[in-house]
Image (cartoon, rainbow, N blue to C red):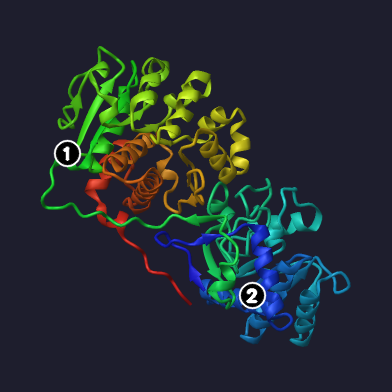
Amino acid sequence: MQKITPGQRHPLHGVSPTRRIEQSAAAQLSPHTLMQRAGLAVARLALAIAPHAQRIWIACGPGNNGGDGLEAAVHLKMWGKQPIVTWLGSPASASEDTSAAYQRLLEADLSVEAAPSGNFDLCIDALLGIGSQLREPQGQMADWICQINASAVPVLAIDCPTGLYADTGQTTALHVKASHTLSLLTLKPGLLTAQGRDAAGSVWLDALGLESGVLTELAPTAYLNPAPTDVARLHASHKGSYGDVAVIGGASGMTGAALLAARAALHAGAGRVFVGLLDDSALTVDVQQPELMFRPVKSLDFSAMTVVCGCGGGQTVRAVLYAILSSSARVVLDADALNEIAFASDLQAALTARAVRQAVTVLTPHPLEAARLLAVTATQVQTDRLAAAQTLARRFACTVVLKGSGSVITSPGQTPVINPTGNGRLATPGTGDVLAGWVGAQLAAGQTAFHAACRAVYWHGALADAWPPGAALTAGRLARGRALQPAPILSVQPLFTI
């Protein structure tokens, strides 16, 4: 068993492949083995997260997730705890594994209560697991979920919090809010993106003793974005060795967005950073960052540099966007550039044509920008973030970073990556401009589009995770953070094992 922490590359499997893995493993093991292992794993983790808990409420559902809870109760009783078991199932309708677990419960001198009673030191959610569908819980299950959420004690969810869809991270309005989730056999993508990160709490994984070969029989749905390694600079190098970045944006009243992207590119290691502001009356020097070189947009040779376009561009960016798409070898498109492309067929054609001539493109939309590009709603994008990002990547033949909790990075033909770093501190103006600048710097230094995006997104979130408590994280500080605090960004935390 291990706690999932940022740094490691883990394969992620959805519900269907997980069930196929489970069926394949069960066919090779003695009857009931997997459920017994699952119950033991749950009981062990319960002791690890609440070692002094005595009264433990285990809310069991009618399926195999409930069977895992019954098995956990047996172990907890053997170890001197007081499990209080409620069960929505019955021996007559249960699976063979769950029926066997119920018999073991009776043999351990435990019984099923009609409803939870008294106070508890720990709650275990064994209601639905990966069987959760996007239907609002009803009746007794809904009542128990409300009691679990109101309990003010640690909550351990088995496999997936009830009401959370394991494939996508969507939740029903009423769902279990776990402090810990033990993912069994495989790590589920829904625990790590959309609403999943808030619902699941700390995520743990137990493969239930399966050999790695069994777990790799099916291709992963996605991977967890690993910590990037820093690239050492050769002594015999110069600023030209790390590429030029041109930031095009900053229409009237919005120059700050372009400056944030430019400063970020500079601090992320770009050799030279040019700023082409779309407001002709704007400043021509950044006194806080004099290394930035301001140039009229028309004077820049887009074919010779990496272009970051759209940050604070407003509708004014439309005038230069076609030229950028048609001539630049490497482009990062953000914010207003994406909005203009969404409503202009000629720009969409120019964007898709870039792949034909092997030009590199990275899109960095938030959910609403992605929705505009796909002609759907933001709610539909959030319904299945992995699918939305993959659709965008295929439609426009480029690398996509779908921002948000558990950002998704993907390219055509590439297994998507979900990023494990970042928190609500990034929900402030300008942090997306900073990310665009960081991606641009990575492209200019020679990274592929997919790896440039993965590296920048990981750093972006990791800096927010490492930021000192109580200190405000503004986009301006974030833009400089790659240079100020490299150690927390690049460190790989050891796995926690029990």
Q: Quadrant of residue 244?
A: top left
Q: Position of residue 215 (x, y in %)?
A: 57, 69
Question: Which residue occupies the foreground of this view, 177 or 26?
Answer: 26
Residue drawn at the location 42% of the way across and 62% of the way down: 8
Tell whether 18 sits left or right of 315.
Answer: right
Q: Quadrant of residue 38?
A: bottom right
**Mark 1 residue crowding within 10 angstroms, few (<14) / some (14–19) / many (20+):** few
Question: Mark on residue 86?
Answer: none
Residue drawn at the location 18% of the way across and 32% of the way down: 289
Q: Secondary structure at mark 2?
A: helix
Q: Position of residue 350 (x, y in %)?
A: 45, 24
> Which amino acid type is marked by label 2?
Ala
Residue drawn at the location 72% of the way across and 59% of the way down: 131
> Which amino acid type is marked by label 1?
Gly
Question: Mark on residue 38?
Answer: 2
Which badge, 1 or 2, comes first in the chain's sequence?
2
Question: Mark on residue 240?
Answer: 1
